[in-house]
Image: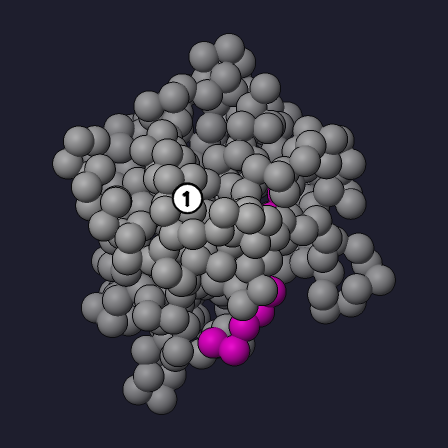
Amino acid sequence: MKQYFPKSILFLILFSSILACKTQNQTTTNNATSTFQNIGSKSISQVDSTQVLADIKYLASDELKGRRSGEKGNEVAREYIVTRFEKLGLEKFNDTYLQPFSFYKRFTKKVYDCNNIIGKITGTKHPEKYIVLTAHYDHVGEKNDKIYNGADDNASGISGILAAAAFYKKNPPKHSIIIIAFDAEELGLEGAKHFVDHSPVAIENILMNVNLDMISRNDKNEIYICGTHHYPILKEKLGDINAKSPLNVLLGHDTPDLGFNDWTNSSDHGPFHKKEIPFIYLGVEDHKDYHKPSDTFENIDPSFLYQSTNLVLEILKSFDQ
Ligand SMILES: [Zn+2]
């Protein structure tokens, strides 16, 4: 903790100039120092910004070659996440973090051997009830000799679940939290589909899913919480979540009239919803680098990612009552 404090300060000084946050807009004494103090106090108690950036940077590096399921880069990403789970001291199910599964895809005529990565933090008051926090670690690999790094999609979500895990290891939750890095989302939500059919805990005991997919950038400083249309009780529990973040936190993208803009089944929360498990999906609108080789670490917004990881904690806290 002591060592990371100065580093985090450095990071904040570095990026305070590019912060375009809601707090700044609303504050009349709008200067870098007040923003810095505001965010600085949060970083000490909640999120290690240096670690969050290190995680996303490594997972989105060329070395991992776009983390395509069934390929070497995906395996290297998996090893990294397992090591991070071990370092955080997350509990295991059946003595392992890995949940292997296989499936056949007609369009590539291939059998894929994949692995979800699953850890747990036992709750203090309701250990038999679970909140499942998820993000997919796979991406689309390489095409025409170009690496699709998938920094926002979805190295960002993995850095978010790791930050939340670190927080809850230090501040034990009331309900148990299952933390999952899903494989094979890009091939059709296969990891999540496998999990809900082979959950290590009784599915009736899963209270809800919080899924992170693309949480590190938006030109308008906006991020969406999708799912409350289907589960109004979650909206109640969230309360005025927008007030708890400098980002513009919007509810929506979850009504059928929106067509392609209805995100109800757009990521790994979909299979949970099909099992009638309430979900919240946190993510941004598609951007110019979405599913392009330019979705790189250099093109994410570090301060946005830092604020969205803090927002993940605020969301989890509102449900872990
Ligand atoms: Zn994604």
Relative height, residue 310 to residue 168 (above, below) = below
| Amino acid type shown at disc 1 | Ser
Whole-percent x, y for residue 156 in the image: 41, 55
**Residue beneath disc 1:** 34
Of the pair 111 and 133, the residue shown nearer to us: 133
**Residue at screen point 54% across, 68% down:** 219
Outermost residue, top side: 125
**Residue at screen point 59% across, 58% down:** 222
Give yes or no for residue 285 being in the magenta stretch.
Answer: yes
Whole-percent x, y for residue 152 in the image: 43, 63
Whole-percent x, y for residue 22 in the image: 56, 51
Determine the image quadrant of residue 223: bottom right
Is 286 on the left-hand or right-hand side of 158? right
Determine the image quadrant of residue 295: bottom left
Q: How many marks?
A: 1
Relative height, residue 265 to residue 175 (above, below) = below
Where does the N terminus fall, quadrant-wise? Answer: top left
Outermost residue, bottom side: 144
Of the pair 202 and 210, the residue shown nearer to us: 210
**Residue at screen point 23% across, 50% down:** 10
Whole-percent x, y for residue 5 in the image: 22, 37
Of the pair 171 and 118, the residue shown nearer to us: 171
Which segment did they paint magenta? 280-289
Give yes or no for residue 40 being in the magenta stretch.
Answer: no
**Residue at screen point 53% across, 34% down:** 314
Circle 1 packing at 10 Å, graded few (<14), some (14-19), many (20+), is: some
Q: What kind of element bears circle 1?
A: helix
